[in-house]
Image (cartoon, coloured by chain):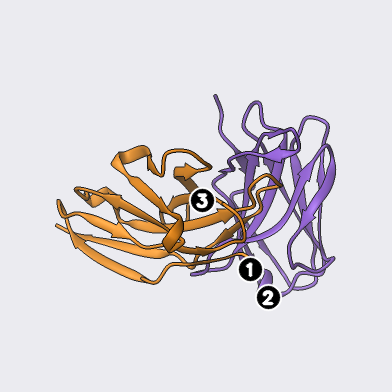
Amino acid sequence: AQSVTQPDIHITVSEGASLELRCNYSYGATPYLFWYVQSPGQGLQLLLKYFSGDTLVQGIKGFEAEFKRSQSSFNLRKPSVHWSDAAEYFCAVGESGGYNKLIFGAGTRLAVHP
Amino acid sequence: DAGVTQSPTHLIKTRGQQVTLRCSPKSGHDTVSWYQQALGQEPQFIFQYYEEEERQRGNFPDRFSGHQFPNYSSELNVNALLLGDSALYLCASSSTSGGVAGTQYFGPGTRLLVL
């Protein structure tokens, strides 16, 4: 069965510091992979996605993620965090070539110190 | 270009009542998926509608039902509400091509509180 693990429940970084949020997935084939961000009480905003091709994908707001098949990982990175990046981040896997039902990780809550 | 819209934004019901939530997909999208997000949890897939039919369902009881209209908008109905149904209900729309659903874009959600 598909599953997604986000090992870090909470992360705190200082504004301007670099960020890496971890995501590991379990899926039989090459999955569709996504990162979404959610501000309190809001819906989910798509940051970036990986379907195939280049394993380093660029997203909005200066985020990027790298797909590593050998490690079953899809970690999210940002070189310099802004206070407005404080939010909940969800990694998700979708069924490739199918209906793309999303399975989400438990999320990582990011706090940014000034 | 309007994104995914949902109504109402907030709703309060009592146990045993029935509720209907509504979703309009992004322009050009024909597929609607519904997710339930309990407080402090990740979203859980309820079901997906395409061509006015439910084509995939998550682990939710039959109290949860839906409908998709010819204009691709969708409704989520929940009967016999339980306290545990209190959650943020998220609608996501996507475009299906060749039977394959694309990237899902989410609406702002409907916050349901069951008392």
> Dot 2: what SS?
helix
Along the horizontal axis of the image, is A16 left or right of A84? left
Which residue lies under the disc numbered 2? B83
**Quarter of the image holding residue B23?**
top right
Residue in the picture at 51% in, 63% down: A25
Q: Nearer the viewer, residue A64 or B31?
A: A64
Image coordinates of residue A11 in percent, x first then y, are 28, 67
Chain seen in purple: B
Q: CA distance from mark 3 to mark 2?
A: 33 Å
Along the horizontal axis of the image, is A112 left or right of A39? left
Indicate whether B39 appears above or below B24: below
Image coordinates of residue A107 in percent, x first then y, are 44, 64
Q: CA distance from mark 2 to mark 1?
A: 6 Å
Image coordinates of residue B50 in percent, x first then y, are 78, 40
**Mark 3 or 1, which is nearer the eye?**
3
Residue A28 circle label = none
Q: Quadrant of the C terminus of chain A?
A: bottom left
**The residue marked by circle 2 belongs to what chain?**
B
Q: Quadrant of the N terminus of chain A?
A: bottom right
Which residue lies under the disc numbered 1? B86
Indicate whether B41 appears above or below A69: below
Q: Nearer the viewer, residue B37 or A11?
A: A11
Chain seen in orange: A
**The residue marked by circle 1 belongs to what chain?**
B
Which residue lies under the disc numbered 3? A33
Query: Are the residues flagged by discs 2 and 1 in contact, CB closer than 8 Å?
Result: yes
Along the horizontal axis of the image, is A39 left or right of A44? left
Residue in the picture at 34% in, 45% down: A64
